[in-house]
């Protein structure tokens, strides 16, 4: 754990499997960010990864920012900010064509 | 448990049951590895059309997979056909030692209904004997499953031997309450515990309060069904991990189980979840010969309610493949 920021607080999250080499870790991190933002968009939230800070920064339209360590925490915090779960099957996320 | 041929010539059949994610394959894998069951002809039944469990069970003498229908309802005819064929092969071989047939049921099966179906079949009734119904109950999720799912109660009621799985990490007070609840549902069954197939002690506390088991709504609610999702596109593991983590965070109560093999840059990963808890994905070895059909890579099965395959595929396309 980093003594300055306290990350990571827990050993690897399940979503980190499958990326054991540094190259695949970086690739996973950036593909992941794109998909996270697609899922957050219908809820007017966004996530940011500056490549230096561990974890992701979650941003609400009112400017509130939360630093999250893993995806479980991200969805939990996003649900809190949006006031509803970030559900990839919901009518809000998937409006009828 | 190595049986000499029975005097009546009937083959012993052991039925392994338990709710989705109870740990049936894991428990069985250990028993096969330790040879506790003797020579085994294993039949694995999966409700979904994508078999996964047979990958874990390469230690049996023979493994057959009946995929695409739960053996107590939609897949009953294929189970009966497979068992008749095994009996006929056995007669033809004239083996002096029978071994046993072990049926690992799908998590959606009622072992009692399977035993009843076999007893009604004019051929199997004379050729097979149900030599045990073993039902596994998840130490962590068992109480909620018993409270919410009628099926989970029927499974426990059908058991002759109940094994509480994954007891480590569950407070002993909760374990004692679960034990008392199971004891009340099925006072006759032998009750034990196992962690990854290795026996463990169950706490004994006759004062523990059994859980309330209210009338369940699940009989009238939408039934739990398997749904297949093909993970098309380039996103692979990165896509699955993000999309699925969001889906489980939002709908973990309705999606009781997810299984599948996903390819990643570092190998083929076996993905398994029970409600919101996803096991650390295991990197799979190359498929063994005779382990039955290999599961399709990059197809996952989501077992639950409140969704359909078309909507799952649309969500995947919208958010992951873009």
Image: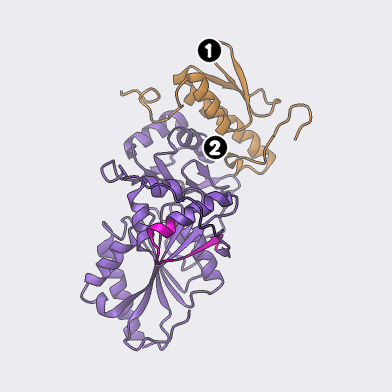
The residue lying at 63 percent from left, 39 percent from top is A24
Image location of residue B212, percent across then percent down? 40, 46
Image location of residue A46, percent across then percent down? 54, 20
Q: How many marks?
A: 2
Badge 2 local density, few (<14 within 10 Å), some, or many (20+)?
many
Q: Nearer the viewer, residue A87 or B59?
A: A87
The residue lying at 31 percent from left, 63 percent from top is B112
Badge 1 local density, few (<14 within 10 Å), some, or many (20+)?
few
Q: Nearer the viewer, mark 2 or mark 1?
A: 1
Shown in orange, the chain is: A
Q: CA distance from mark 2 to mark 1?
A: 26 Å
Shown in purple, the chain is: B
Q: Which residues are magenta?
A: B182-197
In the picture, the quarter occupied by the N terminus of chain A is top right
Coloration of the structure image: by chain
Image location of residue A40, percent across then percent down? 49, 23
Quadrant housing residue B103:
bottom left
Give the numbered dot on residue B238: 2
* Image vertical order of residue B198 relative to residue A49, above or below: below
Q: Which residue is mark 1?
A: A61
Residue lying farthest to the top in this orientation: A62
The residue lying at 58 percent from left, 63 percent from top is B200
Pointer 2 and pointer 1 on the same chain: no
SS at mark 1 in the image: loop
Specify whether B282 is left or right of B146.
Answer: right
Q: Can residue B52 be seen in the rendering of this structure?
A: no
Instruction: Mark 2 and mark 1 in contact? Answer it, CB < 8 Å.
Output: no
Specify whether B229 is left or right of A97.
Answer: right
């Amino acid at each position: 754990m980093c003594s300055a920021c306290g990350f990571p607080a827990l050993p690897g999250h399940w979503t980190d499997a499958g990326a054991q080499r540094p190259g695949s870790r970086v690739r996973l991190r950036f593909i992941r960010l794109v998909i996270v933002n697609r899922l957050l968009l219908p809820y007017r939230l966004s996530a940011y990864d500056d490549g230096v800070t561990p974890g992701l920064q979650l941003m609400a339209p009112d400017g509130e920012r939360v630093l999250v360590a893993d995806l479980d925490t991200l969805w939990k915090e996003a649900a809190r900010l949006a006031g509803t779960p970030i559900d990839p099957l919901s009518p809000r996320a998937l409006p009828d064509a | 448990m190595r049986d000499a041929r029975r005097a009546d010539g009937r083959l012993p059949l052991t039925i392994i049951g338990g709710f989705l994610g109870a740990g049936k394959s894991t428990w069985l894998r250990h028993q096969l590895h330790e040879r506790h069951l003797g020579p085994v002809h294993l039949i694995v039944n999966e409700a979904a059309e994508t078999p996964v469990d047979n990958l874990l069970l390469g230690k049996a003498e023979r493994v057959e997979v009946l995929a695409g229908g739960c053996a107590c309802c939609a897949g009953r005819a294929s189970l009966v056909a497979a068992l008749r064929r095994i009996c006929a092969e056995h007669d033809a071989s004239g083996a002096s030692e029978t071994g046993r047939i072990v049926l690992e049921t799908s998590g959606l099966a009622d072992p009692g209904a399977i035993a009843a179906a076999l007893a009604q079949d004019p051929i199997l009734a004379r050729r097979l004997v149900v030599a045990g119904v073993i039902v596994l109950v998840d130490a962590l999720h068992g109480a909620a499953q018993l409270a919410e799912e009628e099926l989970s109660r029927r499974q426990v009621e059908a058991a002759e031997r109940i094994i509480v799985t994954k007891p480590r990490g569950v407070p002993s007070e909760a374990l004692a309450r679960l034990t008392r609840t199971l004891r009340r549902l099925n006072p006759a069954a032998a009750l034990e515990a196992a962690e990854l197939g290795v026996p463990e002690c169950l706490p004994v506390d006759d004062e523990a309060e059994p859980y309330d088991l209210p009338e369940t709504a699940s009989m009238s609610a939408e039934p739990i069904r398997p749904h297949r999702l093909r993970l098309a596109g380039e996103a692979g593991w990165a896509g699955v991990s993000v999309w699925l983590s969001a889906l489980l965070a939002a709908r973990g109560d309705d999606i009781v189980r997810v299984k599948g093999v996903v390819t990643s840059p570092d190998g083929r990963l076996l993905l398994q979840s029970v409600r919101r808890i996803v096991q650390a994905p295991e990197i799979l070895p190359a498929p063994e010969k005779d382990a039955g059909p290999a599961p399709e890579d990059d197809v996952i099965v989501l077992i639950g309610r409140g969704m359909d395959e078309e909507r799952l595929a649309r969500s995947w396309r919208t958010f992951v493949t873009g």
